Amino acid sequence: MLKRVVILKTDINKLKYYELLDFCIKHEDIEKKEKNEIIEKLLDYKRYLDYPKYFVEIKWLEGSDRKKFIESINSSNDSQTIYTFSISLKNNLYDDEVYMLFNSLYSFNNDDYTKKFIENYFSQLKPKIEEIIFKICDDKNYSFLIDLYIKYQSNLSNCTKMTGVFKNARALENLYLNNVNINIENLTDYDQLFYHMKSNVNIYVKNITIAEFIYKRLEENSVVANIFYGSEDNWQKYI
């Protein structure tokens, strides 16, 4: 006499977090409706540190599913969390996902994380690097802009807009360059910025080496400026 075998369907509502995650990783033949329910449950947990694991190990995640998790991590309002997620998935993100994460990081005004992000994902951001630089240009984020321009100017097809930006920067009374990684080995990179700069401008940089470099560069152009180095809570005047 044949015995009837009954296969019980897993009730995902009864699974705890790690049981649910294990179920997702081990099973690909899940109905669309159930997949959507699982995604919503994972999103509700907001286990941001586990998001990279979802992208790599849950093989049935589609582009629209991945976008939901990226939107979720962007909503964390934490630039470190977003950056950590991004770097954990280096070489495992689509181009449109990389650009979404860049826009999110940039919106937090954390130049350090945004610079590192561009460096790590430059191969995917390269087609948009001109658009990115001009976006920062429109925002008048001069410190960040100059840093990126010097580093990636060879990737710009049209530098006309930058000429106007440097002209505007030269007209400022206070020019904050304390986040710019100035390359003192290549003086010509900064000709557009320091040539014809008005006198008595206040320039803020990160250390005394850069302060000395700028002082001498301006002196060559007969420009007198007040140069400060250090940080926002402890500026020291150079000379």
Image: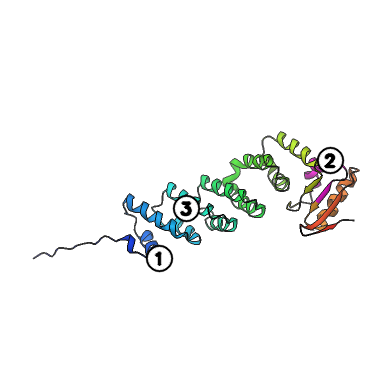
Tag shown at residue 115: none
- Residue 185, position in %: x, y? 79, 51
The residue under the point 71% across, 35% down is: 161
The residue located at (86%, 41%) in the rendering is 198
- Per the rendered image, the range of residues in magenta is 184-203
Quick one: label 2, few (<14), some, or many (20+) residues within 10 Å?
Answer: some
Whole-angstrom CA distance, mark 3 to mark 1, is 17 Å
What is the three-letter code of the residue carrying label 1? Tyr
Q: Give the residue at x 81% y 56%.
A: 229
The residue labelled by disc 3 is 69
* Apparent side of residue 210 relative to residue 148 in the rendered image (left or right): right
The residue singled out by tag 2 in the image is: 195
Image quarter (top left, top right, bottom left or bottom right) of the N terminus: bottom left
Q: Is residue 202 magenta?
A: yes
Label 1, on which residue?
A: 18
Quadrant position of residue 142: top right
Give the secondary structure at mark 2. Answer: loop
